[in-house]
Every structure is written in C-alpha cells, then in structure tokens.
Image: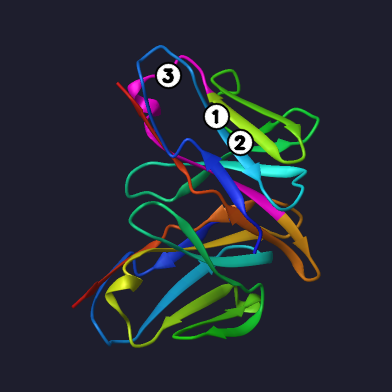
Amino acid sequence: GAVVSQHPSRVICKSGTSVKIECRSLDFQATTMFWYRQFPKQSLMLMATSNEGSKATYEQGVEKDKFLINHASLTLSTLTVTSAHPEDSSFYICSASVPGSSGNTIYFGEGSWLTVV
Amino acid sequence: GIQVEQSPPDLILQEGANSTLRCNFSDSVNNLQWFHQNPWGQLINLFYIPSGTKQNGRLSATTVATERYSLLYISSSQTTDSGVYFCAVVASGTYKYIFGTGTRLKVLA
C-alpha cells in the first residue's frame, strides 16, 4: 500500500509556543490530505482537509487561525499548532487519499503525540 | 452529517475465541474501511470494503450497503489482536472519511 510518513512522532512544547507537524506521501502524489485529532479513549475527529495549492477546509468548531495548514507541494502537508495550550495536547494523525478503480482508499501516517506543558 | 456507530464498545475475549464487530451508518456510503489501532496509536488498514465480503487470514469483513452496516469477524483471536477497531466511511456525495465510535478489544492469554 501507499506510504505516508509523519514527523515528529512525539513532541513536547511549552504553553504559548507553536509546533509544526509534517505529513509526507513517500511514494505517491497526494492532492488531498486529511488531518485528524484523537483524544484519549476517543475516536478520530476530522479537523480539516488539506488541498495542494489552495486553502484548507476546516470542520465546524476547528479554529483555522490556531491550526494552520499548509499544503505547498503534492507530497507535503504541514499542521502548525499556534500558541499551544495544555488542552491542545492530543494525538494528531494525517492521512492521504489514493484513488483506485473502485474508490478512494486512505492511508495514515504514524501519528504525532503532542504534549503541551 | 452521517453518524457511524460501532458495537460493542468494549470486548474482552479469551485467546482462541471468535468475535464479530459491527459498524452501523446512518446514510448511504461510497467507501468503507476497517482499521486496527495498536497501543502505540498506529492505524493499520485491514479492509477496504464498501460492499461485499473479503477475507484475509483470520479476519474477514462483510458490508451490506443497502442495510447500512458492516461486520468484522475475528476468528481464533490472539493477544496481538488487542487494540481498538474502527470503521470509517465516506458518505455518498462527500469525500471525507468519518470514523466510527470504535470497539476496544482485549484478548487475554
């Protein structure tokens, strides 16, 4: 299957600072990537859809000025958590959609554990 | 938006037992996938199954799209099967995968 790589896998940052998470498609071009957030013992919640060369589309309730998404190339999307607070501590995971003959399959990165102290 | 409910929410099995996990969705879908999330958070793609039946070793899945549900069967469970199982769907007319509520499975040795 397709390979999606995410970095860093774990990051600890101080409250008030910003942190960037990268999501790369290693063996295919991804015009669309998706960012999810998962709190402990909960499901994955879609935050936004990242579109190459255009603005991201955010889900209702997600602050676009706090979670900056940039998709500058066909293989890289980045999520920047700005002015992080402890309540932003979570597992963030990206995915890319790969079109197939019978529909689109999504593949996930390894995820990034963010802890804000 | 579409609602995706999974049952049971929690399941404890003895090693070697069989189980069936269910995913119900509230609207018609174009795509459906089953994932296993391991204790480190990694999501492993198990099946892409918008309709029909597929098998892969001890796992198999069936989706009855007209009745809006999918089933994941685990036979002869092993401790390494422990983790959380998610189904995710793309509602017709959309392009985004929405995740179900998950089933947390623990297999005891």
Q: How many marks?
A: 3
Quadrant of the drawing holding the C terminus of chain A: top left
The residue to which callout 3 is attached is A84
Judged left or right of residue A91, residue B78 is: left
- Residue A88 covered by magenta stretch: yes
Q: Which residue is at 76% across, 55% downward?
A: B93
Density class for disc 3 (Cα within 10 Å; few <14, some 14-19, many ≥20) is many
Quadrant of the drawing holding the N terminus of chain A: bottom right
The residue to which callout 1 is attached is A62
Q: Quadrant of residue A99?
A: bottom right
Percent position of residue A44, x then y: 47, 48
Percent position of residue B102, x then y: 41, 60
Q: Looking at the picture, which amino acid does disc 3 mark?
A: Ala
Q: Which residue is at 41% across, 75% downward?
A: B21
- Residue B75 covered by magenta stretch: no
Outermost top residue: A16
